[in-house]
Image (tube, helix red, strand yellow):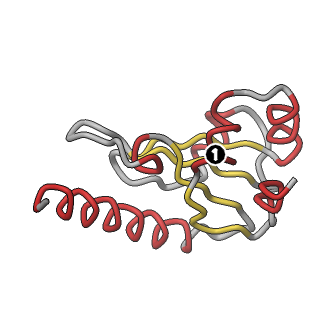
Amino acid sequence: MEIIKERRRLREKRIEEAEEWASKIPFRVTAILIGSYARGDFNLWSDIDILLISEDFVGNLLDRLRNIDAPPGYQVIALTPKEFKTLMEKRETIIMEAIEYGVVLRDDLKILSLRKK
């Protein structure tokens, strides 16, 4: 049981760190923790996967990531709301996982009101 408590504590710590980072993004954004930390099946080598959605994103993915100061160990996917919607309509795995299991870190765009639909 002690191992389970420690894993919960570590997961909560990572979520708090990700929330703090997301709160400092200087533009309107929806930030969702996805992947193993969101599901709870992380391991020592897991990175912290974040889906960012913003109307302010322009250019290709590399251009978008240059404007985001992600900490080491973070894997960020930056999408526009239109791209998110298109991928959702196609039922892309990563988007469906974000809707189903994602941990909302920040939701300025109210994107996850889609969970109710």
Q: Quadrant of residue 83?
A: top right
**Residue 98 position within the rendered picture, expressed as x and y whole percent measured from the top left:** 64, 45
Q: Seen from this angle, which residue lies furthest left?
A: 2
Q: Nearer the viewer, residue 89 or 28?
A: 89
Say which element carries label 1. helix
**Residue 26 position within the rendered picture, expressed as x and y whole percent measured from the top left:** 64, 70
**Residue 45 position within the rendered picture, expressed as x and y whole percent measured from the top left:** 24, 36
- Residue 86 vs 1, above or below: the answer is above
Name the residue at 61% across, 52% down. 67
Query: Quadrant where the N terminus lies?
Result: bottom left
- Residue 40 vs 105, above or below: the answer is above
- Residue 50 vs 12, above or below: the answer is above
Name the residue at 28% across, 62% down. 8
The answer to whether residue 2 is left or right of residue 74 is: left
Number of residue marks: 1
The answer to whether residue 67 is left or right of residue 16 is: right
Name the residue at 57% across, 45% down. 66
Q: Residue flagged by tag 1: what amino acid is it?
A: Ala
Q: Nearer the viewer, residue 22 or 10?
A: 10
**Residue 102 position within the rendered picture, expressed as x and y whole percent measured from the top left:** 58, 52
Q: Which residue is mark 1?
A: 98
